[in-house]
Amino acid sequence: MDGMAHASSSSVSFSLGALVLLLGAGCAYSLAAARQRQQGKRWNSWRSLSFWLGIGVLMVAVWPTTMEYAHRDFRGHMLQHLLIGMLAPLGLVLARPISLLLRSVPKTTGRSISRFLHSTTLQLVSSPWVATVLNVGAMYVLYLTPLYAASLHYSVLYYWLHVHFLAAGYLFTWAILAGPDPGIRRYPLRTRLGVLWLSIASHALLAKLMYGFGWPRGSPHSLEEIQVAAQWMYYWGDAAERLLVIALFARWYTQQRTRRVAFSMVR
């Protein structure tokens, strides 16, 4: 009983801390965007809306009620995974927060950030293949090994998984869209499409394995909970991935149209 009370208290503390950080990030983004406009520089309001949508999704995911639901019910955990790792990153990436940061900080700080963005480590982890392994591959490790059951007993591991979901989801989305923020190598469209389809297939396969074989094993969750959560992963995960496909083609179409306009002006 004491262990459960401690876990509940720790969950509330994590939720409140995360909510404060998210609100702070949203306000900082809005202030930076407003400063750009005050200086006569363009900054699309849709980007600000996209960022706040991503922040809003994350706030729902770490709300104390959601955290409590996720800790006791595997369906709640899967809801968190979908919100943190698949939906929120799309809104955040499309908001171009790195571009806004580079335009807001002093030049010396901007050069340091640019060096980090072009570092070998970031270039490696943000490649489509490595980002997919970190994103989807990590889920295989989580659900097909004792790692998930262990996370229910160790708070640090449990909360670290939430951070990983967000970081891996952001890197994957950034890699597939090849931006729109600068810093990563822009792989050909066919390469990114191929990796994306592989990710979709791998995600669906994992959901079927969980549904058919009752993974993750060793957890206190019932088979019914696991099977419903697996269905959510399959269907709602597919819907989130379709949104990413739409964003990818929309971005590609915009780039092609911009190039055609620039070419016609040169002629």
Image (spheres, grey):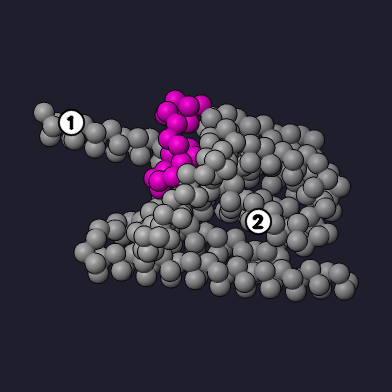
- Residue 221 location, x and y as percent? 81, 52
Say what secondary structure mark 1 lies in. helix
Q: Please tell me whether residue 20 is drawn above or below residue 145 in the rendered image.
A: below
Per the rendered image, the range of residues in magenta is: 174-194
Q: Is residue 4 left or right of residue 13?
A: right
Which amino acid lies under the numbered mark 2 shown in the image of this protein? Answer: His
Q: Nearer the viewer, mark 2 or mark 1?
A: 1
Residue drawn at (43%, 39%) of the image: 178
Residue farthest to the right?
A: 1
- Residue 8 location, x and y as percent? 76, 71
**Camera-side residue: 96 or 16?**
96
- Mark 1 nearby-residue class (10 Å; few <14, some 14–19, many ≥20): few
- Residue 130 location, x and y as percent? 59, 36
Q: Is the N terminus in the top left, top right, bottom left or bottom right quadrant? A: bottom right
Is residue 183 within the magenta segment? yes
**Camera-side residue: 234 or 116?**
116
In the picture of the structure, the residue carrying the numbered disc 2 is 162
- Residue 189 location, x and y as percent? 42, 29
The disc, 2 or 1, on the residue closer to the chain's N-terminal end is 2
Q: Please tell me whether residue 223 is drawn above or below residue 48 in the rendered image.
A: above
In the picture of the structure, the residue carrying the numbered disc 1 is 263
- Mark 2 nearby-residue class (10 Å; few <14, some 14–19, many ≥20): some
Assess whether mark 1 and mark 2 are in contact (beta carbons under 8 angstroms). Answer: no
Is residue 139 within the magenta segment? no
Q: Is residue 115 visible?
A: yes
Which amino acid lies under the numbered mark 1 shown in the image of this protein? Answer: Phe
**Camera-side residue: 241 or 182?**
182
Quarter-of-image position of residue 37: bottom left
Q: Is the C terminus in the top left, top right, bottom left or bottom right quadrant? A: top left
